[in-house]
Amino acid sequence: TRCQQNNRLIVPLSHWILWEACRQLKHWQYQGYANLNLPQIPALMMSVNLSGIQLDQDDLVECIDRILAETGLEGHCLKLEITESAIMATAVSTLSRLEQLKERGIQLCIDDFGTGYSSLSRLHKLPIDTLKIDRSFVSGIEVEQNSCKLLATIVTLAESLGLDVIAEGVETPEQVNRLMALPGECKYGQGYLFSKPVDALQAQKLLQQYQRA
């Protein structure tokens, strides 16, 4: 079926995207952009989405090992983002793969957190480093009291587990102010307030600006 054909294409295409992302970061490191003049982000990292289909592949760790070897990128420079629904559906064998990736220094992030059905008893057992809060919570933070309460709960939970928090969909200075006023620490944000999606050349220009700052 067409769905099966698409699924067969997802894995090689996703691996190519990961390979290209690692190659690009290694190129920037050669260009002298390994470190930034930002206190919260001492070293440049590359974040790449990892699909649930990739997560289920028996040779996932071997493929990522090969990509790192071919591009010359060190594992601690890579962060893999996995949706909440995908990571919560992981089997024991998949959890073992995540732990192997962690052993290589690769950071793991739960993406779109808050849109799935996380089990708190399982969440603390996952080898993750970061929770990425879904934009649906951030968009309502200026007008909805419940959004503020939920965000405060998530940030406090993450802090208790020793996890970093990234707020998605940040578009206004007021949202930043409210995020910074939450109990706990929400140090990182992503959204149009900071930058729209850019290609590699535009991203390099941003890196040049940060280095001059």
Image: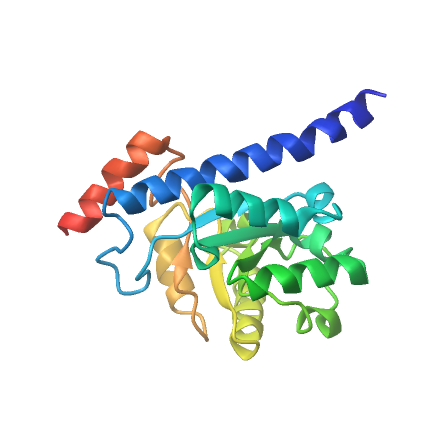
Q: Is residue 174 above or below residue 23?
A: below
Q: Is residue 140 above or below residue 21?
A: below
Residue 185 relative to residue 202: left or right: right
Residue that sits furthest to the top in the current view: 2
Q: Looking at the rendering, in which quadrant would you find the N terminus?
A: top right
Query: Residue 173: percent from the left, percent from the top?
Result: 33, 52
Q: Residue at x 55, y 79 (%)?
A: 160
Residue that sits furthest to the bottom in the current view: 160
Q: Residue at x 53, y 34 (%)?
A: 17
Residue 195 relative to residue 142: left or right: left
Query: Residue 123: percent from the left, percent from the top?
Result: 68, 69
Q: Residue at x 58, y 74 (%)?
A: 157
Query: Residue 2: percent from the left, percent from the top?
Result: 80, 20
Q: Is residue 15 above or below residue 84?
A: above
Residue that sits furthest to the left in the current view: 212
Instruction: Please say which color scheme the image uses.
Output: rainbow
Q: Residue at x 45, y 75 (%)?
A: 184
